Image (cartoon, helix red, strand yellow):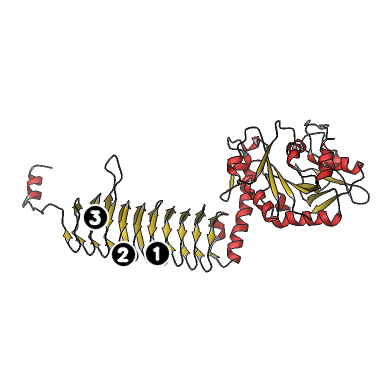
Amino acid sequence: MPAPTVVILAAGEGTRMRSALPKVLHPICGRPMILWPLLAARAAGAERVIVVDNPKRLLAEHLPEDVETAIQAQPRGTGDAVAAAAGRIDPDAAVVVVNGDMPLITAEAIAAAVAAHGELGAAATLASMELEDPSGYGRVIRDADGNVERVAETKAAGDATAEELAIREVNAGLYVFDAAALLAALTSLRGDNAQGELYLPDVVPVMRAAGKGVHAHPLADADLALGVNDRVDLADVTRLAQRRILAAHQRAGVTIVDPASTLIDATVAIGEDTTIEPSTYLRGRTRIGARCSIGPASTVIDSVLADGVIVRHSYLDGATAADGVTIGPFAYLRPKAVLQENAKAGTFVEIKNSTVGPGAKVPHLSYVGDADIGEGSNLGAGTITANYDGRSKHRTTIGSRVRVSVDTSFVAPVTVGDDAYTAAGSVITDDVPPGALGVARQRQRNIEGYAERRREQGS
């Protein structure tokens, strides 16, 4: 079959979510809900994707640029929503319609439904599934020959009879239509139901009356069509989506020690032979190379880690680490923290908007902000870059092979030349030339008998 047009229904308010955020924009594993069926449609070969929004038009800025939108003026049901997109549908093409709150639908499931539709030569093919508890789903009603006769909706009392409610085969919310037949049938829809809405499945009896075939395509996995109505449903589909993500990484050569305590967004990439330790969260646009060890108890957000990087008990947000970098435990790397090859950010170290050169070390108890550190330098415990003067941020430049002694503060802007040293406890306010020792502290003075005088004074 030619590549289909896909219409995604996303105009509903989602009131049961009890949220100011539209239902289909709630995130699932780092991706807005609406993008899950959209990306599945694209991967299934959709030529065009049309998203049906409501008059508030909140979705467009969250969609890829080449996705079209149509507006459903009033919330009058799924049939009316598809009718809102009718002017954008090519009558000579196949049309796939899918609910925007079905995040677990896959490209494979969409492609299989399209293929079945083509093989059967039907005017409409609807995906169905059998559920132990079909509550809330429209029931698929078949005729004596097993063909689909209609769908009995169950949204409100009176929509379906007791006999229809006993049926376990339900409408999954994924349809494939002959576009011309769909467009003709939409004009015949009537709101003759308890809700007074135009239901999309009501095109089925219209097509049947016109002598056209309608078939059902059973889904092998009922999870594919799980919808989201409230936050309980959101948690359920998130759990299933997360399981898929973890399994895909494991099959691609990533060791995940404890999947139950590990969260990885759909947008994260991980290389082979990397190990993810328990209680680790990988978020956003994070990219992790091969042979890394991440965790335990680490969070990595929008960061890029090359090969052989080790992260222990640390928090990274917008950081970059080259090959062989070691981070943590208990390090905090903030946006634009860049660690070059074999550099180290150790225990209780915070780095932001700074570059740590190849082989350079910030081993422990230090703050490095707005700084550039050269190759092979070592910053002792308690090193601080004082980068803010109350109005503006200033940079500190530390050359290569510099040895910074413990408890040194650099008051920016200041530059330390290559091969220089600082004395312990110094507050460096002036540049230190290459190869020099910077000393900036008062000379020690001991007061004899001080403890005895304190006792005599009763304090």
Residue 309 percent location from the top left of the image: 43, 65
Q: Is residue 221 visible?
A: no
User: What amino acid is at disc 2?
Assistant: Glu
User: What amino acid is at disc 3?
Assistant: Thr
Foreground residue among 117 and 291: 117
Asked whether the residues under the numbered discs 1 and 2 touch, taking CB atoms below 8 Å apart as contact, a structural biologist would say: no
The N terminus appears in which quarter of the rendering?
Answer: bottom right
Q: Residues within 10 Å of mark 3 (few under 14, many from 20)?
A: many
Q: Is residue 61 visible?
A: yes
Q: Which mark is residue 415?
A: 3
On the image, numbered disc 2 is attached to which residue?
375
Query: What is the C-alpha distance between the residues marked 3 and 2?
Result: 15 Å
Please give left or right for residue 260 compared with residue 319 in the image: right
Residue 390 percent location from the top left of the image: 28, 40
Query: What is the C-alpha distance between the residues marked 1 and 2?
Result: 13 Å
Q: Is residue 449 above or below residue 80?
A: below
**Numbered disc 3: secondary structure:** strand
**Numbered disc 2: secondary structure:** loop
Q: Is residue 316 above or below residue 15?
A: below
Residue 367 percent location from the top left of the image: 31, 52
On the image, numbered disc 1 is attached to which residue?
325
Q: Please tell me whether mark 1 or mark 2 is closer to you in this view.
A: 2
Please give left or right for residue 160 compared with residue 361 in the image: right
Foreground residue among 183 and 287: 183
User: What amino acid is at disc 1?
Assistant: Val
Q: Seen from this angle, which residue lies furthest left?
A: 448
Please give left or right for residue 446 compared with residue 11 in the image: left
Pointer 3 or 2: first along the chain: 2
